Amino acid sequence: MFDVAPWKPLNEITRFRKEMDRLWEDFFGGKEMASPEMAWVPAVDVSETDDSIVVKAEVPGMEAKDIEISFSGDTLRIKGEKKQESEEKKENYHRIETRYGAFSRSIRMPVSVDPDKIEAKYDKGVLKIVLKKKEEAKPKQIEVKTS
């Protein structure tokens, strides 16, 4: 008739914390909006093909000259600054959600790449960086022989 389950206070605290986090995020429109002082950081996608690692970063409203890319050891670093446009003094803003400021992203590569074969292109707000894998990092197909 009745299911009896042991009371686990830690589970209750965890559930309460998750619910409070959800309410806080709903109120502020997401974690990134919780603090206006938080730095703007572009979204990044990292994918892998047989020959390379591909990094795509969303950096809308920037110019290619404002983006700096470097590679050291096994880490790709993308730096830049999204400058704020001059405000119109006649406009009365009710809400400003556009992020501005300097950013820096460091992405560790999952395999060895050739630093001399890194290409970067910027088009329509998307920065695409292709890092060619070193020969030893490429998958090698082994043929199975029969006797």
Image (tube, helix red, strand yellow):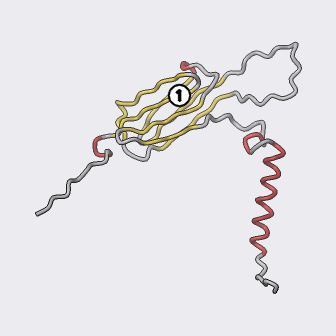
Please state the horizontal and vertical placement of residue 51, each as a whole percent of the image: 35, 39
Amino acid found under the numbered disc labelled 1: Leu
Name the residue located 56 percent from the left edge and 38 percent from the top edge. Answer: 44
Q: Residue at x 78, y 53 (%)?
A: 22
Residue at 77% in and 65% down: 15
> In the rendered image of this protein, does residue 15 appear above or below residue 112?
below
- Please tell me which residue lies in front, 68 or 132: 132
Q: Secondary structure at mark 1?
A: strand
Residue 9 locus on image (x, y percent): 78, 74
Q: Is residue 112 left or right of residue 22?
A: left
The quadrant where residue 5 appears = bottom right
Q: Residues within 10 Å of mark 1 (few under 14, many from 20)?
A: some
Q: Quadrant of the C terminus?
A: bottom left
Task: Provide the residue designation for mark 1.
Answer: 127
Quadrant position of residue 20: bottom right
- Which residue is depicted at the point 26% across and 50% down? 141
